[in-house]
Amino acid sequence: MTRNTLFGGAYAIAFFTFLFGPLVIMVITAFNSSRFPRVVPWECFTTGWFGELLGNARLMDGLLNSVIIGLGVVALAVPIGLAGALALSELPAKLRAMLYTVLILPILIPGVVLGISTIVLWGQISRGLGAGALYNGFFLTIVGQITFVSAYAMLVFIARLQRFDATQTEAALDLGATPGQAFRKILLPFMAPAIGSAAFITLLASFENYNTTVFTVLSESTFTTALASKVRHGTDPSLSALAVIIITITLVGALTNEAYQRRKAAQAGGPSARSPLYANPITRALTHPGVVFAILVAVIAGLSYAGSRHDSSVCEAAVLQDKMARQEALRAAQQEKIEAQQAQENTLPKSNSAFGGAFGGLGGSTPAPEPVAPKPASPSAFGGAFGGIAPPQSDD
């Protein structure tokens, strides 16, 4: 093997480890009974964290709110993005560049600024119109997210429109079709794949947004804000269980889409382009996207049912008992150490120092001072304060 091959292999291993390593770790920690997400030491296999995740009322309420907000964002952002893309395709070059800059600018603005400005603007509007319903967490979040999510949809539509042949619409208009008919029967079917992609992208962008949503949602909570609050107050493997669910949904969608794309490419290429899988009726039926999706769902349902039947209580009780035994052993060792120190201190001679021997009193007891004979009283009127000098005697 050459040096370039070794370097390429090492780079590939490092790249995929960096890319998929955290996902693998999160999948493993989702099935470890430890209260803190960790791979080692392994305690017990359990599926209880999935139940704890589904039993979290705040997360489930936030999930429902995120779905409602996401659907509202998709319903408004996709038409706005499509309108912006169509407008850009019909304008002159100079005006197109100016409008493109204006439409794409919200993506470059920080989400914190968008969230605060949305609250301030619609707060003034609601107070001016006397419409308190406008100052609502759901409404403000949808409006705040549309300001930048619609730009994502517009970029998808612009990329699709670059492949559109405008002569088809012109031909339809020449044959007597109205602009609306030409749009519905020619342009809209051509844009259908882009519409699906834009809807999916805007839904994900709305679902995972935090910077703007945390300001506009007010007293409500979305799945992202509730999840961030849970992480801030302490994490547990239920978040790893959430990662497993997201990874599973992503894999099912990716595999189903791959089966659909391959089947579509084989049908478009004719018999010469079809693989042996599509020549056999049985394998052709098994590779149908619907069948692939059903098989994947059935496998996941079977694994979920088997996992739910697993009882890890005996193993967890044994692990808990082992932890208590180790804690008791550590406590006993600590107690023995303290008793040994106390016994060593008792064997040392005690010091009579007023400071407990802290300043050199460890060498033994300090001998008592010898008695001093009392001094005769001074005849001084000042009690000997000035060296016992007696005042001068008068001649009388």
Image (spheres, rainbow, N blue to C red):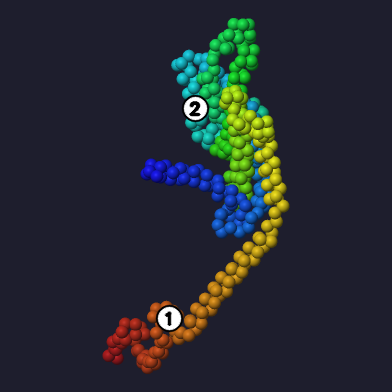
Q: Residues within 10 Å of mark 1 (few under 14, many from 20)?
A: some
Q: Which residue is mark 1?
A: 357
Percent across and percent down for residue 319 are 63, 63
Residue drawn at 59 percent across, 33 percent down? 258
Q: Is residue 345 above or below residue 165?
A: below
| Gap between marks 1 and 2 measured at Cα | 76 Å
| 367 left or right of 34 in image | left
Percent across and percent down for residue 54 are 68, 46
Residue drawn at 58 percent across, 38 percent down? 208
Residue type at tag 1: Gly
| 90 left or right of 377 in image | right
| 380 left or right of 286 in image | left
Percent across and percent down for residue 67 are 66, 35
First in sequence: mark 1 vs mark 2: 2
Asked whether residue 135 is in view, the answer is: no
Which mark is in front, 1 or 2? 2
Q: Which residue is mark 2?
A: 105
Asked whether residue 159 is in view, the answer is: yes
